[in-house]
Image (cartoon, rainbow, N blue to C red):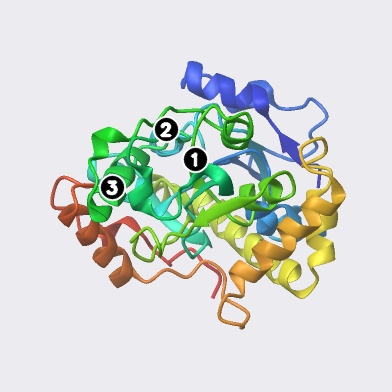
């Protein structure tokens, strides 16, 4: 299978959602329209996507009759909107943002957890003096612009007993590490210890404030979202989503069984971003995240009761308006049996 990362498609999606994704496809593409599935990523390719790229590398997607087109995000906040509009078939997003999007009437549902445990940390240089969330008062903390990030930071501040308005939060999109290393900010939020943390630790001494230390509840860090109306009304689309999830499940299993296979799959996708040693450390750290309880996880499965509880927590803490039942924002119906 020929993997395509379509940076131009991302720009097209953001600029004009009526333009076909096919306009950015390669003329050399040998797959049929019936096979293709556009997959909008949450970030540049990195080991959080190891299940996706390992599936592509091993031919798992081809075995399941689907040809994914991985699209670089033009804006990390666009995923739910574009899937709702049908301008991306599926996207990698976040549990928090998926619940927010559903509560706002966007036509999205999570069909599988890609990273089922929270990673969203605050990272700072060790000499910053920041040791707990309370130390963030009066500091500048860079974020990546996701819809839920400011509300989450406000919650962290209130829980720590400090004024949320005392924290300045510039949006640096995907330039989190650069902002911290160049001392433009005191800390970065939304950083992952298995990705940004690994890279930063090679260049400076860092302190990582984990989600648990910040008082954040358990949730799925990364999920795969699809359009529920299309799933119900378009059998071909539903079949492609099923094939994509089945292939991704096999990709995760292959990566966990042999992390070197995941490194091989990720190497061409991350060329120029991470050197080989850094990539290997990131893959190993991501495998450890997925195996956090020491067992081999079943790919994708989500507990609707957990989503309902998390949505209640969001509502209770000012992150969510409206009466949405979080359980309705997720489904396991399209995962492999």
Q: Which mark is residue 157?
A: 3
Please report contact status of discs 2 and 1: CB closer than 8 Å, yes or no: yes
Mark 3, secondary structure of its residue: helix
Viewport quadrant of the C terminus: bottom right
- Seen from the viewer's position, the closer of residues 292 and 200 is 200
Q: Earlier in the sequence, mark 2 or mark 1?
A: 2
Establish if 249 lies above or below 18: below
> Which residue shows up at 73% across the image and 44% down it?
203
> Which label is found at residue 140?
2
Q: Position of residue 75 (x, y in %)?
A: 50, 28
- Residue at position x 58%, y 35% in the image: 180
Q: Quadrant of residue 86?
A: top left
Question: Which sits earlier in the primary sequence, circle 1 or circle 3?
Answer: 3
Q: Residues within 10 Å of mark 1 (few under 14, many from 20)?
A: many
Residue 54: x and y in percent read 75, 58
Image coordinates of residue 198 in percent, x first then y, are 68, 53
Task: Determine whether the residue tagged by mark 2 lies in a helix, strand or loop.
Answer: loop
Cβ–Cβ under 8 Å for marks 2 and 3: no
Q: Are marks 1 and 3 in contact (CB under 8 Å)?
A: no
Q: Secondary structure at mark 1?
A: strand
| Residue that badge 1 annotates | 187
């Amino acid at each position: 299978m020929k993997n395509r990362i379509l940076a131009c498609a991302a720009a097209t999606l953001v600029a004009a959602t009526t333009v076909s994704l096919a306009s950015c496809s390669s003329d050399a593409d040998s797959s049929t329209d019936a096979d293709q599935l556009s997959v909008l990523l949450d970030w540049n390719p990195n080991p959080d996507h190891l299940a996706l790229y390992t599936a592509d590398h091993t031919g798992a997607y081809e075995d399941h009759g689907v040809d994914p087109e991985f699209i670089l995000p033009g804006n990390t906040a666009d995923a739910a909107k574009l899937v709702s509009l049908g301008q991306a078939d599926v996207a990698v997003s976040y549990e928090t943002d998926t619940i927010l999007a559903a509560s706002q009437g966007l036509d999205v549902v999570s069909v599988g957890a890609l990273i089922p445990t929270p990673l969203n940390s605050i990272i700072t240089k060790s000499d910053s003096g920041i040791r707990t969330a309370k130390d963030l008062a009066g500091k500048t903390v860079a974020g990546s612009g996701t819809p839920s990030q400011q509300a989450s930071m406000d919650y962290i501040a209130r829980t720590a007993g400090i004024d949320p308005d005392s924290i300045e939060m510039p949006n640096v999109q995907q330039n989190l590490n650069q902002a911290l290393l160049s001392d433009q900010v005191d800390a970065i939020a939304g950083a992952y210890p298995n990705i940004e943390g690994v890279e930063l630790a090679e260049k400076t001494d860092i302190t990582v404030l984990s989600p648990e230390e910040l008082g954040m509840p358990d949730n799925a860090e990364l999920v795969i979202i699809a359009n529920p109306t299309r799933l119900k009304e378009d059998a071909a689309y539903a079949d492609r989503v099923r094939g994509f999830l089945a292939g991704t499940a096999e990709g995760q299993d292959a990566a966990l069984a042999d992390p070197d296979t995941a490194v091989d799959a990720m190497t061409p996708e991350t060329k120029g971003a991470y050197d080989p040693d850094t990539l290997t450390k990131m893959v190993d750290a991501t495998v450890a995240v997925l195996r956090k309880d020491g067992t081999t996880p079943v790919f994708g499965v989500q507990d609707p009761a957990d989503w309902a509880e998390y949505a209640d927590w969001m509502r209770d803490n000012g992150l969510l308006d409206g009466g949405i039942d979080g359980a309705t924002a997720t489904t396991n119906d399209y995962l492999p049996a």
